[in-house]
Image: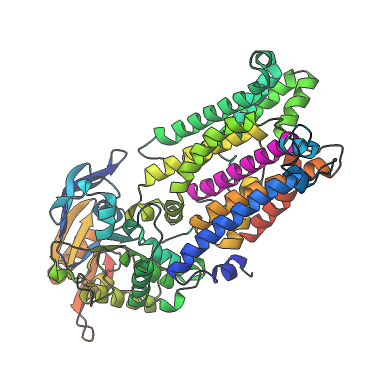
């Protein structure tokens, strides 16, 4: 079987200077891709607007309809998409390296199931909605994500010294099905309108309405990204195995802890903002590896940029394909991601 | 010198090593022998600092390794595991450059010096031609050599460069550099077994690397090692120069096997032929 990664990796740098150049090229290239996508995406929609009018400084903002549509109606949604996409893709990269499993996703460790349970309880019980206003659902889902994170972390560390990635994986998978069962049970008891609402939430929705949810999400996601920045080289070594990494001077436990907590935090925040949008966290990292090789110093920044751009584009497709009807963005990513995932699965045999 | 001083260790209260003392002199080439489950690999992990002894201590040039920080430790002691499986596809050069980790700061990228060192360790292990290959496509023997190259790249002094003024440890006996090999021949064919023995010997002699090698292969150990440590049930049964340790009596006591041990007329090494179970 022809190995595409082999042929691409054969073009890897032969000199140290070119590694530095590649790191810069990847950061700037994929960063620009994300920024350009975020600027172009709001131009697309039922009302067409022009970029030059949006940024025309001679027209006061109050009279500039194009700028209002751009900045008030559509840009928050694009930024939310970029933030969620970047977080899920980066979390996917980090968890795949941590678990040494190319099929891991940000949702493997139960964080998203916890988030879904939290969101669904608020939707179904209804009461807190009136107490906290529109922020109740994202808050509850973030709390659910943190709860799941705490349970999985506790289980993975309680048995022995260190962090067992096997227990991490098993606990995550078990928690996923447990929470899903509770969700189904509550939905079964809930009235149809609430069930519909919670099902809609699970499909993912980036229509955040304003900049406020983005600002809320920014704190935990920013914190995770600061942690991510420290991880790439240690993640490279972890793929050789924990012992090999340790004998090369890595503090394995600290790296695993940092990787798990930061990836889970980013996932929890992303899910709270946009719902559990699937497949970004697995397609993007693998696409990126095909493009830049396996070095996490390239894979992580590239995944952040491509994840942002990919989700923003999927969201444009979701709101324009059957316009004026809007498709759930999770459906678009899954319809693209499902077949891709299967292809990967077959290819890895 | 790398030494285990009266070391004990157990997994979940099941004792694996019991009062083991081993000393590996700088420049030494020591083989650790013993049947399955005798504690060879565990001893290796303790010597590498991967496991903390429950009693006793491991010292490197006199200092307890528990107090040596892990990056310093990695520049002095490198491990070649029995097998290396990668979760993702890296090139051979990437793998060797990973050995430079303990020399780089968090955000530092490998520089020209690191690349030179990596290339020299590739040359020293005879794997220069594999540099751009992906690790997963290599054969077992090739993988092992690449992992050895990566281990050599860890050392603080450039072992693969004999002209390095800071290089040879005989000029600096207080800085032992130790290569720990776990079952290096277990998955190799005859030809690669010989090649591995030759490589280890060269590293030990020319590049002045101290070597500890765990193995099942008595004849491999007999031809290669200056000294042997023989374990059974987590205790040292015999230790000392290969010539004195490798006797029918020791083999009988450790493996419950009757063996003929004699000097081979061509190699000049002791050669073990197992005859029957005792």
Q: Quadrant of residue A74?
A: top right
Image quarter in which the C terminus of chain A is found: bottom right
Asked whether B57 falls inside the magenta stretch, the response is: no
The residue at 75%/25% (across/down) is A197
Viewer-proximal residue, A202 or B26? A202
Viewer-proximal residue, B100 or A173? B100
The residue at 49%/37% (across/down) is A223
Question: Percent from the top left, x then y, of residue A81?
Answer: 67, 41
Question: Percent from the top left, x then y, of residue A226?
Answer: 47, 42
Instruction: Name above or below for residue A80 compared with residue B261.
Output: above
How is the model colour-coded? rainbow
Question: Percent from the top left, x then y, of residue A98?
Answer: 48, 47
> Where are the magenta residues, as a range?
A72-99
Question: Percent from the top left, x then y, of residue A145?
Answer: 56, 30
Drawn side of residue A28 relative to residue B224, left or right: right
Instruction: Name above or below for residue B111 compared with residue B40.
Output: below
The residue at 43%/47% (across/down) is A230
Drawn side of residue B35 relative to residue A266, left or right: left
Viewer-proximal residue, A118 or A14? A14
Drawn side of residue B98 relative to residue A336, left or right: left
Q: Residue furthest front?
A: A58
Q: Residue furthest bottom?
A: B266
For residue A173, say whether it is visible. Answer: no
Secondary structure character of the magenta stretch overall: helix
The residue at 66%/46% (across/down) is A279
């Amino acid at each position: 079987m022809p190995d595409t990664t082999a042929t691409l990796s054969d073009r890897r740098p032969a000199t140290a200077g070119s590694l530095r150049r590649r790191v810069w090229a990847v950061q700037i290239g994929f960063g620009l891709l994300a920024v350009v996508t975020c600027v172009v995406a709001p131009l697309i929609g039922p009302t067409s607007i022009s970029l030059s009018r949006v940024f025309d400084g001679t027209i006061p903002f109050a009279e500039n309809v194009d700028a209002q549509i751009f900045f008030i109606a559509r840009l928050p949604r694009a930024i939310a998409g970029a933030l969620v996409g970047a977080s899920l893709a980066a979390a996917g990269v980090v968890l795949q390296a941590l678990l040494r499993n190319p099929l891991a996703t940000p949702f493997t460790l139960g964080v998203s199931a916890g988030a879904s349970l939290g969101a669904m309880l608020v939707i179904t019980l209804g009461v807190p909605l009136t107490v906290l206003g529109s922020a109740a659902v994202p808050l509850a889902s973030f709390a659910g994500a943190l709860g799941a994170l705490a349970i999985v972390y506790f289980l993975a560390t309680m048995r022995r010294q260190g962090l067992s990635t096997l227990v991490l994986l098993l606990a995550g998978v078990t928690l996923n099905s447990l929470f899903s069962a509770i969700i189904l049970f509550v939905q079964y008891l809930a009235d149809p309108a609430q069930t519909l609402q919670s099902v809609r939430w699970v499909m993912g929705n980036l229509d955040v309405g304003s900049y406020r949810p983005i600002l809320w999400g920014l704190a935990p996601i920013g914190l995770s990204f600061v942690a991510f920045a420290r991880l790439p080289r240690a993640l490279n070594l972890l793929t050789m195995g924990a012992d090999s990494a340790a004998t090369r001077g890595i503090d394995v436990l600290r790296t695993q802890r940092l990787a798990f907590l930061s990836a889970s935090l980013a996932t929890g925040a992303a899910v709270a903002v946009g719902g559990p949008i699937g497949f970004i966290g697995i397609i993007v990292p693998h696409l990126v590896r095909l493009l830049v090789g396996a070095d996490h110093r390239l894979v992580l920044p590239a995944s952040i940029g491509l994840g942002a751009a990919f989700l923003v584009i999927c969201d444009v497709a979701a709101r324009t394909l059957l316009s004026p009807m809007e498709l759930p963005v999770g459906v678009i990513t899954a319809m693209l991601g499902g077949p891709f995932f299967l292809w990967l699965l077959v290819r890895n045999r | 010198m790398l030494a285990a001083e009266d070391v004990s260790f157990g997994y979940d209260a099941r004792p694996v090593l019991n009062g083991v003392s081993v000393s590996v002199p700088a420049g030494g080439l020591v083989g650790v022998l013993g049947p399955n489950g005798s504690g060879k690999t565990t001893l290796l992990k303790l010597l590498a600092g991967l496991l903390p002894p429950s009693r006793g201590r491991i010292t490197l040039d006199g200092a307890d390794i528990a107090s040596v920080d892990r990056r310093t430790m990695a520049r002095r002691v490198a491990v070649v595991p029995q097998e290396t499986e990668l979760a993702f596809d890296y090139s051979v050069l990437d793998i060797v450059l990973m050995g430079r980790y303990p020399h780089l700061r968090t955000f530092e990228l490998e520089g020209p010096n690191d690349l030179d060192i990596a290339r020299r360790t590739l040359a020293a292990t005879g794997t220069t031609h594999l540099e751009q290959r992906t690790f997963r496509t290599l054969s077992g023997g090739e993988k092992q050599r690449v992992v050895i190259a990566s281990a050599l790249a860890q050392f603080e002094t450039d072992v693969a460069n004999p002209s390095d003024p800071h290089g040879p440890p005989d000029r600096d006996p207080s800085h032992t550099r130790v290569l720990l090999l776990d079952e290096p021949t277990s998955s190799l064919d005859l030809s690669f077994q010989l090649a591995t023995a030759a490589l280890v010997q060269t590293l030990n002699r020319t590049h002045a690397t101290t070597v500890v090698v765990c193995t099942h292969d008595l004849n491999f150990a007999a031809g290669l090692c200056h000294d042997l440590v023989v374990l059974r049930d987590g205790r040292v049964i015999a230790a000392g120069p290969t010539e004195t340790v490798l006797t029918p009596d020791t083999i009988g006591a450790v493996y419950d096997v009757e063996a003929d041990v004699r000097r081979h007329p061509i190699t000049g090494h002791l050669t073990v032929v197992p005859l029957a179970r005792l």
